[in-house]
Amino acid sequence: MKCLSFDIWNTLLDLGKLYSLIAEELSEITGRRKEEMEAGLKSAYQKALSLRLEGAFRSPILDSARVFASELNITEEGLFRALVRAVMRAETGEMVFDDVHRALDELNAMNIKMGLLGNVMFWPGMVTRIILEKNGILRYFHSTIFSDESGVQKPDRAAFELLANRLECRLEEMVHVGDSLENDLAGALISGASAILIKRDSPTSFSIGKRAFVVRTLTEIPGLLSKL
């Protein structure tokens, strides 16, 4: 193993916390209850995920924004405004999971090249970079690739290959860490990389063959790398 790739949302950063902030802003903009807005965001996210996996999005940000706006019964402009207001709030610097800093510190001390590989929904990768910086973790990564900038997205092999090239390693030398069975685990394995699925609510950690693991915490990763 020569390099390490990470997904971002629900792997390093808690998407639910961001949606909670967006829901608060939408509530203020629309006069509707925050709980209604939050439920709508979660429902729209699942719909948008399915459509993206089916290849239905030609322009990921705009197409996903239409799905979210329709589900929430708001305008796309209102959705974008709520997002901007949420990102500007101090609470966006409190989205990192408890196990992230310790794991990244240990991996950084091992001199492992690390990169980020993220798909996008209704905001661009640059906004996610801002949130990563506010949470103090952007500095750990040698390269950051987002689908709106690269034109390729997980689970496509091209996305994993692009990051491997940026990190100057072969796919067979890369381990990808993420929370999605389809985009992260399957995408990495089919591409030729090894994979670690983060599942914090799993009753136990376990291996899936020789190239894949399920872990309950990111702090297990440094000890797993010797097995890959």
Image (cartoon, rainbow, N blue to C red):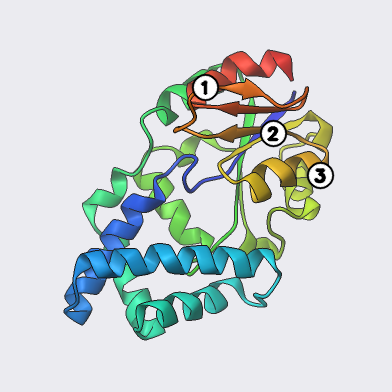
- Assign the C terminus to one quadrant of the image: top right
Instruction: Answer yes or no: is residue 141 visible.
Output: yes
Residue named by callout 2: 195
The foreground one among 212 and 123 is: 212
**Picture layout, residue 120 above or below residue 201:** below
**Picture layout, residue 197 above or below residue 203:** below
* Label 2: few (<14), some (14–19) or many (≥20) C-alpha neighbours in 10 Å: many
* Circle 3: residue type: Ser
Q: Earlier in the sequence, mark 1 or mark 2?
A: 2
Residue named by callout 3: 191
- Assign the N terminus to one quadrant of the image: top right
Label 1 and label 3: CA atoms lie apart by 26 Å
Task: Looking at this view, name the residue that lies furthest to the front.
Answer: 203
**Picture layout, residue 47 above or below residue 160:** below
The foreground one among 220 and 114 is: 220
Q: Which mark is residue 204?
A: 1
Is the Cβ of the residue at disc 1 closer than 8 Å to that at disc 3? no
